[in-house]
Image (cartoon, grey):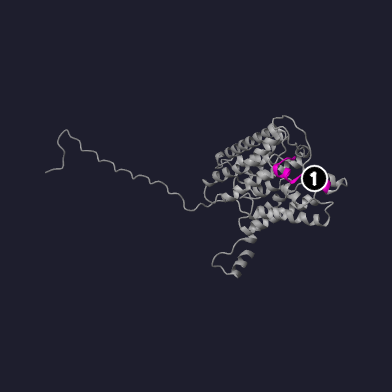
Amino acid sequence: MTDEHPAGEQPAAASPKPEPKAEPKAEPLLVMSSSPHVHGDREIPRIMRDVLIALAPGLLVGLWFFGLPALRVLLVAVGGCLLFEWAMLRALHRPGRLHDLSAAVTGVLLAMNLPPASPWWMVLIGAFVAIVIAKQVYGGLGYNPFNPALVARVLLLISFPVQMTTWTLPADPLRLDAATGATPLGILREGLALGRTADELTLTPAWKLLLGLRGGSIGEVSVLALLLGGLFLLWRGHIRWQIPAGFLAAVGIVSGIPWLVDAAHHASPVFHLLSGGLVLGAFFMATDMVTSPVTRRGMLIFGLGCGLLTALIRLWGGYPEGVSFAILLMNAATPLIDRATRPRVFGTGRKLFEEGKAA
């Protein structure tokens, strides 16, 4: 017998071996990245969405009291931040997406820190500073050492002091123009300089300060609405109590000491706690995951430092409000606080741990 095939027949082609099916890639058990990427990229949109929900009460009160001009500031701030974020991600070929909502949160916070009558071009400059200079230049989300919205606010305050200190008083929400007036802290600072007493200058009832019936930035006026949003973030576990508690306690204690000594020339701690952007800063700006300490002891030190600096600036500084400057200064100290308060490695003796810190 031979192995030859009959005439006219071709040997059957060998059937190719089936390629093994690619197994689906397993989710990584550990994601190594800079904060706030603690649980992976899927967590970021959820956190940012909750922050927007928490900001909504204070923002809606500001839009109701200040009307269409405040809405225009909000739209320009959010739209500008989204535009600059998209442009920088494409220009730098950097991974990132608009739907992680981080740029939207920055835009909302920027709008809430601006006067209702802010011109559109100034708001757009603020959006550029917040996204391009304070965020993307440092590497994008998770790498910025300072809170982007506060960097923009302080730069605008220094560059355009007239526009940044022109405050609108709550009135008809459907108005296109409105009466202007000073904030409670501004009235206090100017009146004391003219020789008036603190009792004469702090006659605004506490309930009006709680509800927001006063001049100020769009999102800082209603303390009650901001407290509701802050409690929501605490309940969701996105912030811890140490920073806001330390912040508010330090302002109350430091402002209360001179008031007890000389009440005629110093406002009460209750007035300081309910005025300005203190509650907005304590719950929404100082608690930024990227720019605040990661240890609980460090968070408390950070909050106390913010409150101390805020009170000192309000009492003896050149500005009636000090929240923004205080938070940015403490942002710069965050790496030192983290280093000083880092926990001892499990199983490491105290002497060896102290030697490692010194190195």
Range of the magenta residues?
A: 199-215
Is residue 3 part of the magenta span, yes or no? no
Q: Does the magenta stretch include residue 210?
A: yes
* Rendered location of residue 166, percent (x, y): 77, 37
Q: Is residue 195 left or right of residue 230?
A: right
Q: Which residue lies furthest to the left in this view?
A: 1
Pick whichever, 155 or 230, lies toward us. 230
Q: Quadrant of the C terminus?
A: bottom right
Number of marks in the rendered image: 1
Q: 231 above or below 4? A: below
Residue drawn at x 56%, y 39% is: 98
Q: Could you tell me which residue is drawn at 64 percent across and 40 percent down?
A: 108
Q: Is residue 66 above or below residue 141?
A: above
The local crowd at label 1, few if under 14, some if 14 to 19, many if 20 or more residues have their Cα within 10 Å, is few
> Where in the figure is residue 156, as x and y percent of width and height?
73, 40
Q: Which of 67 and 322 is in front in this view?
A: 67
Residue at 65% in and 61% down: 340
Residue 78 placed where, x, y %? 63, 37
| The quadrant where residue 137 appears | top right
Residue 58 found in image quarter: top right
Which quadrant would residue 72 be assigned to in this image?
Answer: top right
Q: Element type at marker 1? A: loop
Q: Can residue 131 be seen in this view?
A: no
Q: Position of residue 76 (x, y in %)?
A: 66, 34
Amino acid found under the numbered disc labelled 1: Leu
Q: Name the residue under label 1.
A: 203
Left or right of 90: which side holds 168? right
